[in-house]
Image (spheres, grey):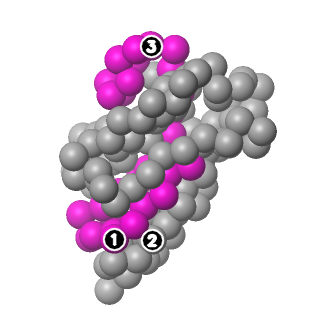
Amino acid sequence: QLQASGGGLVQPGGSLRLSCVASGRPLSTYATAWFRQAPGKEREFVAAIRQSAGSKVYTNSVKGRSTISRDNAKNTVYLQLNSLEPEDTALYYCAATKSVQISSADQYIYWGQGTQVTVSS
């Protein structure tokens, strides 16, 4: 089970840190990703961190202003979002997979419930 949290209302230029806590499974053995879905749009890949060595992948729209990380002791994956823009407004989901295709939502078998991020002045 994955539990996402940390969303909220933030002004443009602000920051948020999203958390994804896993129970029952060690996230270090899964690739873990964040996806987001805005109203009327398809779910899109945001960032992922691979198991083991923990290499990271970001979508271009957040590259340079976001960081995904993992705390194995807390069995938690984080997504730090900086310089937030109104276009970042969406429901953010965390997900876990054993697949190597880490940017494809259909490869993920475990999903959290989503946490809302709203960027507005």
- Which tag is nearer the camera, tag 3 or tag 1? 1
Estimate the spatial distance between the alpha carbons at disc 3 and disc 2, rounded to whole Å: 30 Å
Q: Position of residue 33 (x, y in %)?
A: 46, 35
The part of the chain drawn in magenta is 78-107
80 on left or right of 1 = left
Q: Residue at x 54, y 61 (%)?
A: 17
Work out whether 11 lies above or below 6: below
Residue 34 inside the magenta-drawn segment? no
Q: Position of residue 110 (x, y in %)?
A: 55, 26
87 on left or right of 18 = left
Instruction: Say if mark 1 contacts mark 2, CB within 8 Å.
Output: yes
Q: Which residue is mark 2?
A: 15
**SS at badge 2:** loop
Label located before the other in sequence (3 or 2): 2
93 on left or right of 75 = left
Residue 71's mark?
none
Residue 99's mark?
3
Q: Position of residue 107 (x, y in %)?
A: 40, 18
Q: Which residue is mark 1?
A: 83
Image-quadrant location for residue 83: bottom left
Q: Residue at x 39, y 66 (%)?
A: 82
